[in-house]
């Protein structure tokens, strides 16, 4: 099993191929998150930390809307690419390689902290979760807003799927297919993941496989962890209401 950092370092150059149209996804996701932020903090613009920015899927869109964004991520390769992709779109912002369990920012400086697209469940223990949430709270200003998006693990734990549906991106080389195989641990809570990308190679396929693990945290458990970390006003926003494709948790630093 490779480390999470190795997984995302290796995936960074190909990450956009998970989406049929990455720019369209960025715009859609940022519009949805921006709606959630504005409904709670007002029109802004706001100072936003995306503490698992990856190659910038949410951060670039939020910067494009006008927020003052800082991006950080465990994967230095992804963080560098996020900065370059943002600059190429004329919305440059600073990024840093940083573990969300040890955020290298001063206390109380951000209006909002975003941790989106199932990044938090890469932490596999309650201790790591506690440390990360305490750090996110520390860098938020008084009354600042936490936004976490995660897979719907209540439904997923009930169904215990062993794979994800294929996603297809059209590239100059042809169609690239991405899917995942999951192997559940005996605890029924965590799973190992094999991330496949099939890349056309003439009449053949090049197969790129990367491996990592997740903790399928149910909502109740995540709600409790966020409340235990000292946040208040913890609430969940369904995709139908928020327009974001995953459930989003918001909470306030009060
Ligand atoms: C599924 S990706 C989502 C990335 C980005 N939010 C996006 O949607 O493109 C999960 C991200 O979480 C980051 N990550 C995982 N564990 C982390 C940690 N301990 N600290 C900071 N980032 C972490 C990974 O490096 C990866 O970029």
Image (cartoon, rainbow, N blue to C red):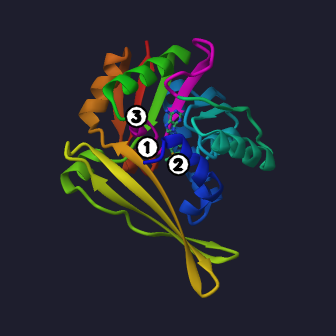
Q: Which residue is mark 3?
A: 123
From the Cβ of disc 2, is ligand 1 less than 8 Å away? yes
Q: Is residue 179 visible?
A: yes
Q: Nearer the viewer, mark 2 or mark 3?
A: 2
Q: Residue at x 73, y 32 (%)?
A: 94
* Residue at the bottom extreme, as displayed: 203
Q: Nearer the viewer, mark 1 or mark 3?
A: 3
Look at the picture and state if 172 lies above or below 76: below
Residue 141 visible in the current orientation: no
Which quadrant of the figure contains the C terminus? top left
Asked if residue 93 is among those painted magenta in the image, a careful observer would answer no
Give the x, y percent position of residue 69: 67, 32
Q: Is residue 192 left or right of residue 196?
A: left
Tell me: residue 104, above or below residue 212: above
Residue highlighted by disc 2? 7
At 54% across and 61% down in the image, what residue appears? 18
Determine the CA span between mark 2 and mark 3.
14 Å
* Mark 3 residue CB less than 8 A from any atom of ligand 1: yes
Where disc 2 sits, the SS reads: helix
Segment tinted magenta in the rendering: 100-123
In this picture, residue 96 sits left or right of residue 114: right
**Of the pair 174 and 10, the residue shown nearer to us:** 10
- Around disc 1, counting alpha carbons within 10 Å, would you say few (fewer than 14), some (14 to 19), or many (20 or more)? some
Along the line of sight, which residue is nearer the eye, 184 or 95?
Answer: 184
Disc marking residue 118 = 1
Single out the mark in the foreground, 2 or 1. Answer: 2
Q: Is residue 120 above or below residue 117?
A: above
N-term mark: 1 or 3:
1
Q: In the structure shown, which secondary structural element does the residue marked by tag 3 occupy?
A: loop
Residue that appears at 32% across and 26% down: 126
């Amino acid at each position: 099993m490779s480390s999470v950092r190795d997984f995302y370092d290796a995936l960074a150059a190909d990450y956009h191929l998970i989406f049929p149209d990455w720019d369209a996804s960025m715009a859609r996701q940022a519009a949805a998150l921006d709606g959630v932020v504005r409904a709670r903090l007002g029109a802004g613009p706001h100072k936003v930390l995306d503490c698992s920015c990856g190659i910038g899927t949410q951060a670039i869109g939020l910067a494009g809307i006008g927020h003052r964004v800082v991006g950080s991520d465990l994967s230095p390769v992804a963080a560098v690419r996020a900065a370059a992709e943002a600059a190429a779109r004329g919305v440059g912002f600073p990024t840093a390689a940083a573990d969300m369990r040890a955020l290298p920012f001063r206390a109380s400086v951000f209006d909002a902290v975003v941790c989106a697209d199932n990044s938090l469940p890469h932490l596999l223990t309650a201790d790591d979760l506690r440390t990360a949430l305490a750090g996110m709270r520390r860098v938020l200003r008084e009354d600042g807003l936490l936004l976490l998006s995660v897979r719907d693990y209540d439904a997923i734990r009930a169904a215990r799927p062993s794979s994800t549906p294929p996603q297809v991106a059209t590239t100059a080389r042809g169609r690239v297919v991405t899917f995942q195989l999951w192997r559940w641990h005996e605890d029924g809570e965590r799973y190992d993941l094999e991330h496949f990308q099939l890349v056309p190679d003439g009449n053949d396929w090049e197969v790129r496989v990367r491996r990592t693990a997740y903790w399928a945290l149910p909502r109740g458990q995540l709600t409790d962890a966020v409340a235990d970390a000292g946040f208040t006003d913890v609430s969940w926003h369904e995709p139908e209401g928020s327009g974001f494709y995953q459930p989003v948790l918001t909470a306030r630093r009060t």
